[in-house]
Image (spheres, grey):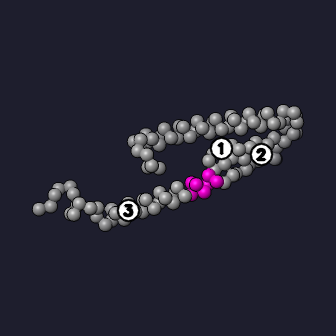
Amino acid sequence: MAKRGGFPGGGMPGNMANLMKQAQRMQRQMEEQQKELESKEFTATAGGGAVEVTVSGKREVLKVKLAEEVVGPDDNEMLEDLVVAAANEALRKVEEESGAAMSKLTGGMPGMF
């Protein structure tokens, strides 16, 4: 007589095992794509090139360049550094909030997403 709620032989049925393998393969591919993305840099401009910002694939502001026409030449470097610091702090807050939201969805289980 078969046990209720179990599978014969104690293993997973073929379809379930295949689904698990596919999920693991997909997770590995996602991790590889994330690593590739993190190694890249992205640059955008605004104001006809007056402001240029470079960020990493890790969502960190790496560099801000302001045209001298926007601010005086003596103020550029300090202002660029301040913009980088403020933008990175704002991005950290987004990551923190995103992590908290994902933790609620996954029930705190590590490695789910």
Q: CA distance from mark 2 to mark 1?
A: 14 Å
Q: CA distance from mark 3 to mark 1?
A: 35 Å
Q: Name which of mark 2 and mark 1 comes first in the sequence.
A: 2
Q: Amino acid at mark 2?
A: Glu
Q: Amino acid at mark 3?
A: Leu
Residue that appears at 84% across and 37% down: 70
Q: Secondary structure at mark 1?
A: loop
Q: Name which of mark 3 and mark 1 comes first in the sequence.
A: 3
Q: Is residue 28 magenta?
A: no
Q: Secondary structure at mark 3?
A: helix
Kindly tell me whether residue 99 is visible in this rendering: yes
Residue that appears at 51% across and 60% down: 29
Q: Which mark is residue 101?
A: none
Q: Is residue 66 left or right of residue 3?
A: right
Q: Is residue 51 left or right of residue 109?
A: right
Residue 74 is situated, as x and y percent measured from the top left of the image, at 87, 33
Q: CA distance from mark 2 to mark 3?
A: 45 Å
Task: Check disc 1 and report the residue beneath it.
Answer: 60
Structural crowding at the residue carrying mark 1, measured as other residues with C-alpha within 10 Å and reported as few (<14), some (14–19) or many (≥20): some
Q: Amino acid at mark 1?
A: Glu
Q: Quadrant of residue 90?
A: top right
Q: Quadrant of the N terminus?
A: bottom left
Residue that appears at 41% across and 44% down: 109
Q: Which mark is residue 52?
A: 2
Which residues make up the magenta segment? 33-39
Residue 19 is situated, as x and y percent measured from the top left of the image, at 38, 62
Residue that appears at 38% across and 60% down: 20
Q: What main secondary structure does the magenta stretch of the protein show?
A: helix
Q: Secondary structure at mark 2?
A: strand
Task: Check disc 3 and report the residue beneath it.
Answer: 19
